Amino acid sequence: MLENVDICVGLAWGDEAKGKIVSSLSQSDTYDIVCRWAGGSNAGHTIWIQNRKYITHLVPCGILFNKLSIIGPDCVLHIPSFFNEIKYLRENGFDTSKVKVSPSCHIVSDDHIYEDTQKESNALGTTSQGIRQCYRDKYARIGTRAIDCPELHSYLWDGKLHGNVLCEGAQGFWLDINCGNYPYVTSSTTLPYGACSLGFSPKKIRTIYGAAKMYDTRSGVDPDFPESLLQDEELKSIATLGEEYGNTTGRPRIVNWLNMNKLVKAINQSGTTMVIMSKGDVLETVGVYRVFSVYAQKLISFPNMVSMKKYIESELKGYCLDLTHVIFSESAKLMSISQMR
């Protein structure tokens, strides 16, 4: 029987350390199943286990901790890429029999990828993975689903959830097709209510973990992140120290100061109850501490990280009604969050 569902959602433009949070939660005995609910191999999570780095693009990172790992019905899957990831996981000693694919998951074809690479991938800053073309065909009701592909039959999920479930978000709130800076968005919903497509009632949702960084980053094209930001020496230093490159494409991410207006809206609309903010240590190394304030409606600076954290926590708790905890973590180590529930 399904008991509870916890969800980890990105509160920015992706790359907010969701993989680190989900992996921290997955390695405990708290969860029985880890699920992806949207997107495809255009996402990427970097997970460190005993000083070894692993990267997943489609398979939920719960597989690295021997959890039943489900690719949900609103995800899209490119079969060769999926089997390459399965091969990668097997070669690194993980039990891929625990990977399951929803029969309703739609298939990204080679034609989808060809079309993506030949048309607007540069104009819209997509990852050239054929994601939007697949979703287009899904909603035109001419797509191919996992249940239609014989090579996936041994991986098909029976649709049953049990125990405690953790849902792993892809991309971030401001890439949501409805909430983001359209058309510079992804082709699916990144908000936590999308996880209900896995087949559970929203009443089962217990905790929503929201992931953010102490500064903003954006991969791909977006007028809200002009290329002129790449010329700012302080932001360039943050990008270099923070190793701000996309896991899937290797593209450099454009860095900007944390926009508290955006963060507050993302927290409130997503229903986030616990925020985990990372990479404060990057700002400490650079020695510059700035945010765009909700209250002051301008960019303000702080003398040190302590005062910056206090200010962020004060604004979040003042403007985010459902928020119960704000946790600050460093790049290399995420503090235990299982006891904060």
Image (cartoon, grey):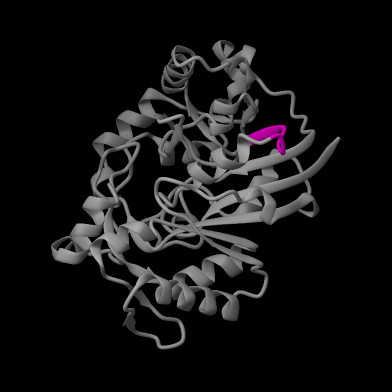
Q: Position of residue 167 (x, y in %)?
A: 63, 42
Which residue occupies the foreground of this view, 159 or 90?
90
Regarding residue 177, the answer to whether it shows in the image is no
Q: Tell me the magenta residue range.
A: 29-34
Q: Is residue 174 magenta?
A: no
Q: Position of residue 237 (x, y in %)?
A: 20, 58
- Looking at the image, residue 89 lies above or below residue 274: above
- Residue at figure coordinates x 54%, y 46% from the top left: 21
User: What is the tally of numbered marks visible in this picture?
Assistant: 0
- Looking at the image, residue 331 lies above or below residue 222: above
Q: Is residue 209 left or right of residue 200?
A: left
Which residue occupies the foreground of this view, 47 or 35?
47
- Residue at figure coordinates x 61%, y 51% from the top left: 337
Q: Main secondary structure of the magenta part?
A: loop
Q: Is residue 259 left or right of residue 236?
A: right
Regarding residue 248, the answer to whether it shows in the image is yes
- Residue at figure coordinates x 60%, y 69% from the top left: 268
- Looking at the image, residue 172 lies above or below residue 306: above
